[in-house]
Amino acid sequence: MDMQMINQVMEATGETLVMVFFSTIFSLMLGLPVGVLLHITGKEADGGIIPSPVFNNVLSRIVNILRSFPFIILLIVLIPLSRIIVGTSIGTKAAIVPLSIAAAPFVARIIESALKEVDPGVIQAAKAMGSTNWQLVWKVLLPEAMPALMSGLTLTIINLIGYSAMAGTIGGGGLGDLAIRYGYQRFRPSYLVAAVIVILVMVEIIQIAGDRIVKRMMARR
Amino acid sequence: MHIKLRNLKRDYGSLHAVQDVSLDIPSNTIYGIIGRSGAGKSTLVRLVSMLEKPDSGEVYYDDERVDTLEGKALIEKRRHIGMIFQTFNLFSSRNAVGNIAYPMEICGMDKAYIRNRVSQLLALVGLEGRGDAPISTLSGGQKQRVAIARALACQPDILFCDEATSALDPQTTRSILALVKELQARMNLTVVMITHQMEVVRDACERVAVLDNGRVVEEGMVSDIFANPKSEVTKDFLSNLTNVKDSIVRWSSQSGRFTLRFRGGTTDEPIISNVSNETGASFNIRAAGVQHVGSEEMGVMVLDIGPDEQHVRAAVELLKKYGVSVEGDF
């Protein structure tokens, strides 16, 4: 293990963190409204607030199609979009675009299923008190689902760490890129090992932190 | 605020949950709606409380039609009613204070006012000092008290109680009913109490409607209905209450089986002895009891009368003359 390798691993770790951080935020921004819509337009028996079967069905199909799209293909398909949004199709910044879009439908489903756990009776009570739909979502649904949302967020971040490793294929940088270029293509297994260890540690930290936060939320209820 | 229901109907597919219900619920009273599970009570309360729209029929609050309200007007109207539930339906993301504050928050009330009003309400329902408690640490009775405080936060005219005591033990049920009665009187509320427990009707309600298969089969003052029940459902509810059931005893096969109901002053007199002396009929008492219905005493007695039809007729006639309601077969 030389200094150069340590520097390279550090740099790649930084790139991975940047990719994961921003794509988590953007996928939440895209997925949250979709997940909320999926839930509130669902059947009343499932806790839907404004049931609209047709809209719900169409949205659900779109989400499913996007979810079943292989990420590696999405990466390539979205090259023009990355160029439009961030001005370039290569590099860490460019990788954030397909990462966010790939994770968004996943986030939407996670949010939908978290909201489904909220007791429909509580929603009915809030409705009977004269809550507007907006208040039902922001003041009741989301706060009530917060622990489930939090563990969903943990899952999303961990998924994105995994996905970000693939972003190396479009020159996205990060630990996955480093492992493939140095570890695999240049026969330097120590790079591979180092990258994998850093990723493992990252995932473990996120998981433990996420679990702690959920636990603390539950303790206050 | 009085509530008027006219020809309410609501179907779920082929299930006629509520069919042709018309009721007048007077203001400033506790009105019971009792029925077995599946009788349509829950649907009815959802229709009356504007949570659901009837297929046909009308709902009026003080002569204002409310079942046709939409959008903002509907939301505004809902803010003037309170509702409590069997499962309490409190927000687990908020403590007691947060729960009680919610209806005021959504109306955009002033923060200082809310804080003040919440502590008033906590005191009103007997939960001083428990405001910071997470909901899960409260007992069932305490949860229902928080729910009551929350329901009354915006000073509603109507309080709907949907099986509000069904998840509580008898002692807690009594304390919650006492609280509802006290608050009803203090705030001039119209309380609509949905239940399947006759003791709730007995202990809390002034009037009652008995629901069966989506229809009102009997309606009136609680004391009248206890003294003189007409429908089979009502009699069934009453026999559950007194533990007097067909299966308990079967004393004789030839003479009939009778249920006598005594009300008010008649419970103070030795009527059975008198009738026995005057007519020569013999009585065999199988079960009897006295209970309080509202402020009145109500006696129930199940007995056989003998020895023959002639004596039975004379005895029944005399009993009725004494003001006792007699049910039974000759």
Image (spheres, rainbow, N blue to C red):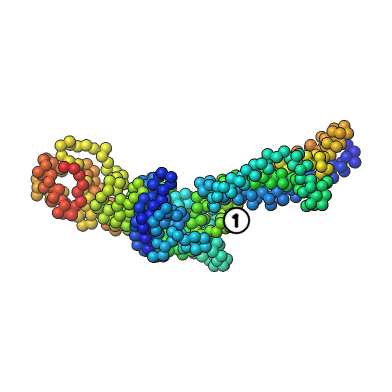
Residue B235 horizontal/vertical position (percent): 27, 47
The residue shown at (22%, 41%) is B286
Quadrant the N terminus of chain A occupies:
top right
Residue B132 horizontal/vertical position (percent): 55, 56
Identify the chain of the residue marked 1, using the numbered disc in the image.
Answer: A
Look at label 1 and name its amino acid: Trp
Residue B27 visible, this angle: yes
* Image label count: 1
Residue A42 horizontal/vertical position (percent): 56, 47
The residue shown at (18%, 43%) is B329
Where is B72 relative to B251, above or below? below
Q: Between A199 and B17, which is closer to the camera in this rendering? A: B17
In this figure, which residue is indicated by the disc labeled 1?
Answer: A138
Residue A194 horizontal/vertical position (percent): 82, 37
Q: Between B160 and A104, which is closer to the camera in this rendering? A: A104
Q: Quadrant of residue B248?
A: top left
Is residue A71 shown left or right of residue A57? right
Where is B330 relative to B129, above or below? above
